Amino acid sequence: MESLSDRLRGRGFSPAITWWEIASYGPLIVIAFVMRLWDVGVRAMHHDESLHALYSWNLFNDLNYQHNPMMHGPFQFEANAAIFYIFGDSDVTARLLYVVMGTVLVAMPFLLRKRIGQLGAVFTAALLTISPAMLYFSRFARNDILMAVWAFGLVISMWRYLDEGKDRYLYFSAALMALALATKESAYLVIGTLGLFLALQVGVPMLARLLQPVEIEGVSPPVAIGRVVKTLWSSYSQGFDLSIISRSSAYLLLLITVTLPLWSAFAAIVQDTPLWSWTNLVLAAPEGHVFIGAPVGGAKVIAFLIIVGLGGLGGLAGYRWNWSVWWKSALIFWIVWVLLYTTFGTNFFPGIRSGIWNSLGYWVVQQGEARGGQPWYYYFVITSIYEYLPLLAGAIAGVFYLRKRDQFSLFLVYWPAVTFVLYTIASEKMPWLLVNITLPLIVLSGRFLAAIVERIEWRSLMRNGGLLVIAAVPIFVVLLWQLAFFEPTQRNAINILLPLALAGVLLGMAASGFYVARRLGHETFGAVALVSLVAMMIVLTVRTGWIASYQNGDTPVEMIVYTQTSPDITRLLDTIEETGAGNAIPLTIDQTSGFTWPWAWYMRSATNVNFPSYGGSSVVSNPGAPIVVVHSQNQDAADEGLRGQYTQGERIKHRWWFPESTYRNLTPTKFVKAIFDRESWRRTMNYWLNREGVSDRLGSEDSYVYFEQGFQQNFSARP
C-alpha cells in the first residue's frame, strides 16, 4: 500500500532539507571529486582519449574543428577546448571535464528526493560515488559519463514536470536533449526509452477505455479484429484536443516533436531492403565513402524533404498543443543544438548538415560493423564483475516494485530493464557503455535499500538480538566460501577435521538463524540479512573500484579496461623528458596499425616529429632522429636499416588488451557444465576477487624502440 509520504511526493510536496542530508551530501561530493581526480593524469592515454584530447586542443589553438560523427557529438571537444584555455593542456586537464561531470552526477539524486525519498537519494548518491564503472569512466576522456548526467537530468525533469506541471521543467528538458544529442548518439536510446514509457503510460489506459464497450466474446477472430479497428478509427476520426492532454501526454509530445527532424536519418534503415533498393538512391553512405552516413546525389533532396516534413509535423503538433510553451521549448533546443554543432557559428552550414543527418546516419550504417564483436551475454558478464551490488539489489527490487505497481515504481523497474535490453540488442558492445546500464540500476537500488532500512524497527531489533544477524551474515558467507573452496595440501587429521568443523559451524549458524527468524519474523529477518549482505558488498565494491581505477587502470587484467595504451609508452615519454630537450628532440614514430595514437597527443607541441608509414622493407637507414619507434612487424627491416647507428631495438607494448577468449563462445551446455564444476567456480572466483588467471594471456600489439648510438638515456620497458 502506498504510504502518506509517497502520496505527498506524488503530488509535488517536497520534504524539508534536513541537517543529516547536508551532512551526507557534502562529504559524498568531496569524496567523489577526490576519488575521480586523484592521480588522474598517471594512466597512459587510451587511443580514444588521445583522439578526443588532440581535436579539443586543435580547437583551442586555432578554432579548427568540424563535427565528425565517428567521434560522436561536438560538446566534449568544445568543453575541453574551454578547459584548455582556462587551465592549460595536459593529461589531467584533458580528463577534467569528466571528473567534474562524474562528481556532478553524485549530487543529482538530491533533485529526485521527492520521488526516491530523502534517504533513498542519499543512498543513490553513495552508490554512484563508489560504483566501479562510474569511478573508472569519470577518470576517462570519453563522453559516456556526460551522457549519464544528461540522461539522469532528463529523468529528473520528466518526473518533476509530471508531479508539479511547471513549464520550466519542459524548458530544462529541451536544453538537456540538445546537450545529449550534441554529446553522443546514445541520446536517441535515452529519448526513445523515456518516450516508450510515457506512450505505454498514456496509451494502455486510453486503449482500455476506448475498447471497453467493444464486444468480442463469442465471435470469430476476423470479426473481433474488425470491431477493434472500427472503434479505433472512429475515435481517431473525431480528433484529439491537444490543448487538454495530460502531463504525461504533454511531456511525450515534447520529446517527440522538438527532436523530430533529428530522427530523419532513421529512414536509411530501409535503403538496403527491397522497399527502397530499387531506387538506387543512397540515404546513408556506407563505409569507404568520404562522408559515411551522408545522403548521396539525388538522395539529398529526399533527405531534405524528410527533414522539413518532420519539422513541420512537429511544429503543427506543438501549435495544436500549447504554442506559447512549445515554441519556447523548441527555441531553447535549437539554439543550444545549433550553437554546439556549428561550434558557435564558426562552422555553420557544414555543422548543421552533419548534425541533422550524418550524425545518426553514420551509426545506422555502422550497426552492421558490430565493433568489438562481443557475445550477446557480454553485459551479463561485465555487470556481474563490476556492478554486482546494484545488479543484485536491483533484481530483488524489481520483484518488490512490480508487486507494488505504482507508476514511479514501475518506471524504476522499466528503466534499467529496457536499457539493458537495448544495449544487449545493439551490435556494438563496449565496457564504457556499462555506464548507461549502471545508472538506472543504482537509482532503483538506492530507493529500494532505503525503503528496506526505513521499514526495519531498529529498537525492537536490538531488544531481540537481531543485530547479531548483521554480524553473522558476512561471517556465514566467508565460512561458506572457505568450505566451498577448501583445498587440502596433504592428507592429515587437521585437513580432514577442518572442513567438518566448518560444516558444523555453518549448520549451527543456520539453525540459530532459523530460530532468530521465528522471533523477529521472516520478513524482518530477511530485511536485516539483506542489509548486512549489502554492507559486505559495499566493502567489496569499494575494493573493486579501487583496484580497477588505481592499481590496474591501464593494465587489461581488468575487463573494464578492454584495449589500453601500455605503461611502456609513458615510460618512454619519461625518458624523453629526462633528456631535457623537451619538444625540440627529433622523433620518428612508425604509424603502422594506427600507432600515431596516442603519440599525436603526447607530441602535440613538438616540431620535429615524423610519422612515416613503414612497410616490411622500407625503414630508412638514416631517419634523422635519435629515437625511432617501429611497429613490431617491421622489426627485421629496422634491424637491418639501423644497424651500427642505433642500439639494439627494445620491444615495448604499444597497446594491449584483455584475453576475451576467457568468456567468448559460451554455450548453454558449457554454462550448465561449469555450474557443476568446482574447478570452474574456483577459476571464476579467483578472477572475480583477485583478477587472477588472465595476466599471462594478455594480448598486445608491440613496437621496437631504437636509440642513436651515444644518446644518453636510461630506458626500460619494464617497471
Image (tube, rainbow, N blue to C red):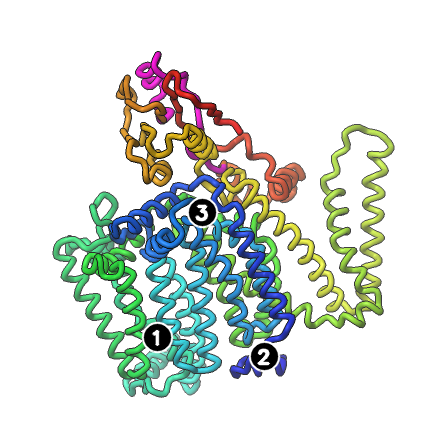
Say which residue label 3 marks: 92
Instruction: Compare marks 3 and 2 and give the one earlier in the sequence.
Output: 2
Say which residue label 1 marks: 254
| Location of residue 673 by image quarter | top right
Q: Position of residue 197 (x, y in %)?
A: 44, 71
Residue 653 part of the magenta segment: yes
Say which residue label 2 marks: 15
Q: Position of residue 156 (x, y in %)?
A: 47, 71
Furthest toward the left, the residue is 298
Report the Cα–Cα distance between label 2 and label 1: 29 Å
User: Secondary structure beneath disc 2?
Assistant: loop
**Disc 3 residue type?**
Val
Depth check, front residue: 88 or 459: 88
Tell me the magenta residue range.
630-658
Q: Is residue 609 above or below residue 124?
A: above
Callout count? 3
Which residue is rendered at x = 30% and y = 16% of the image?
A: 641
| Location of residue 361 by image quarter | bottom left
Residue 503 part of the magenta segment: no
Depth check, front residue: 402 or 257: 257
Q: Nearer the viewer, mark 1 or mark 3?
A: 3
Q: Nearer the viewer, mark 2 or mark 1?
A: 2
Q: Position of residue 671 (x, y in %)?
A: 57, 44
- Local packing at callout 1 (Cα closer than 10 Å; few below 14, some 14-19, many 20+) is many
Q: Are marks 1 and 3 in contact (CB under 8 Å)?
A: no
Left or right: 149 as drawn, with respect to 335: right
Which residue is rendered at x = 39% and y = 80% of the image?
A: 167
| Quadrant location of the N terminus in the rendered image | bottom right
Instruction: Compare marks 1 and 3 and give the one earlier in the sequence.
Output: 3
